[in-house]
Amino acid sequence: MRKLPRKDAVVIGLGWTGSIMAYELCKAGLDVVAIERGPWRDTATDFPPNIAPDELRYGIRHDLFVRPAQETITFRNKPSETARPIRRWGSFLPGNGVGGAGVHWNGQTWRWHPWAFTARSSSEQRYGADFLPEGTTLADWGVTYEELEPSFDRFEYLCGISGKAGNLQGRIQPGGNPFEGPRRRDYPTPPMQQTHGPSLFAKAATELGWHPFPQPSANLSQAYTNPYGCRLAPCTYCGFCERFGCGNFSKASPQTCVLPVLVRHPGFEARTDCTVTRINLTRDGKRATGVTYTDLSGEEWEQPADLVLLCAYQFFNVRLLLLSGIGTPYDPATGEGTVGRNYCYQMSAGAQGFFDDQRFNGFAGAGSVGMIVDDFNDDNYDHGPVGFLGGQSMSSIITNARPITSHPTPPCTPRWGGPWKRAMHDWSGRVMNLGIQGGILPYRDCYLDLDPTYKDRLGNPLLRMTFDFHANELKQGRFGVDKCVEALRAMGAKTVVPNYREGPYSVVPYQTTHNTGGTTMGADPRTSVANKYCQSWDVPNLFLSGAGLFPLNAGFNPTGPVGALAYWAVDAITERYLANPGPLVGRP
């Protein structure tokens, strides 16, 4: 093993959080190195418009995602089952390379509701402790929406998010989301222009007494220059957002919003195609001394550092803590331990409507062009009568109509031959999807740990996921799908097909890349890995980022709070930790 010169800080993973935190540390005068497992990716060279819209390469063959041969996980529904490795990503798609999942995302950017940050205490106060589902390990975050609001604002202005405020400093604004938490100012750019389908949905939703509003979008409605001086262009509605890099500089990503200034900073260095295998500790295990990583040739390197920032994807953050012996692994039998605890996914479902008298032209779309109904999300309505906790956002978003994967036909249509081709022709552009994105509560039997059997190419144990849907979320999902059916009928659909999500959970069909938990933050070190400043309870010069910090999953995409927490944590480092290194929160 070769030992390198010491750095002030080492960042593991160069996606959204890694790039933001690295740049802020560089601005504070630190010498920073980022270590990224995948290759370097740059907009101009990797995603020019003449090659980026390649559905086979990116949408089907998963060019931007982690290769299972690099790293995968094993999966089972229940602790009594034997887990097997995922050999082709399906349900979720972890990113690979510089930019991470921030390259291939759709751009749907949310502030989570204030309720989400105090979900346990707020639910017990409103409904009583007995209303919580049996076996849930639901916990508060240890930080509130009000504390994070300035960080949400910074991330939105970094990305140039296009949207319409619904709550400006406590005053409800027409056309925005009336259920959102108060914000200090409006979005940096106006909402995207809506296409026909979402407009029709908004009209029907309004007639039903709901409150539709435009999806907050990182696909920009107009040209924008962010606070770092990075310039973005308006979206062209090409329909190649999800699973693709944007060659038009229209979708906010680390490549368009941070890296252009980060790579020019003299205090920054990036090393790509290097896999961090462990975080090194002092003999007493109370301080990180740096990291060990392996390059493409198989050679091992030691990078000493005074500060370690864990900024990889959620699964890989959990695994690295377990491989490094940091924190206590979660034990579902006793309910003790923290690392791997509170793993959550999402409940995604919806309905399809087939129309005789409408044409939607779904090929003209973007990852975040659409209208949303938030009336049935989180605690925006009384859950007593429905008998479950949590909720879902409902969306009409025209992301694409790409030819390989987009060919919906009505029920009972033959799956091949002439009748199938005629149905394809007749219904092309006449199908409308409404979807729900439902939150998931954490449960004692849903967790992450190291697999006792399967190892990666370097001989280290794979991460094992144990997860299944519970009755609370299945009931919630049926409620949401029924609302989609109601809306499609109000829109005038000839035929409506509900698509309920039934158990058991499967890793085969794509659902969302919204995996949360496993390295949760909180106020109690017995049930959380990190304190309210995303600092490890056990190793104070280790800070964590990403959706692994979330103690639950909500009915929204996670990127908004992921970005907000990156700013929140790096501010704590630069404003508090560097002046007096040590724990920022005392143990209760």
Image (cartoon, rainbow, N blue to C red):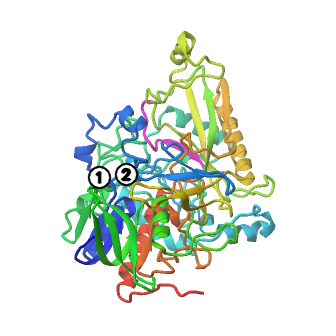
Prevailing secondary structure class for the magenta stretch in the rendered image = loop
The disc placed on residue 96 is 2
Where does residue 185 sit, x and y in percent of width and height? 45, 63
* Segment tinted magenta in the rendering: 363-375
As rendered, which of 237 and 199 lies closer to the eye? 237
Where does residue 105 sit, x and y in percent of width and height? 43, 48
Question: Magenta stretch: residue 56 in it?
Answer: no
Reading the image, the residue beneath label 1 is 39
The disc placed on residue 119 is none
Say which amino acid is labelled 2.
Answer: Asn
Quadrant housing residue 313: bottom left
For mark 2, give the secondary structure.
Answer: loop
**In the figure, is residue 160 to the left or right of 461?**
left
As rendered, which of 511 and 308 lies closer to the eye? 308
Quadrant housing residue 574: bottom left
Say which amino acid is labelled 1.
Answer: Pro
Where does residue 573 sit, x and y in percent of width and height? 39, 79
**Crowd class of label 2 (few under 14; some 14 to 19; many from 20; radius 10 Å):** many
**In the figure, is residue 353 to the left or right of 288?**
right
The C terminus sits in image quarter: bottom right
Query: Which residue occupies 78% across, 66% down?
Result: 127
Quadrant housing residue 426: top right
Q: Is residue 30 above or below residue 350?
A: below
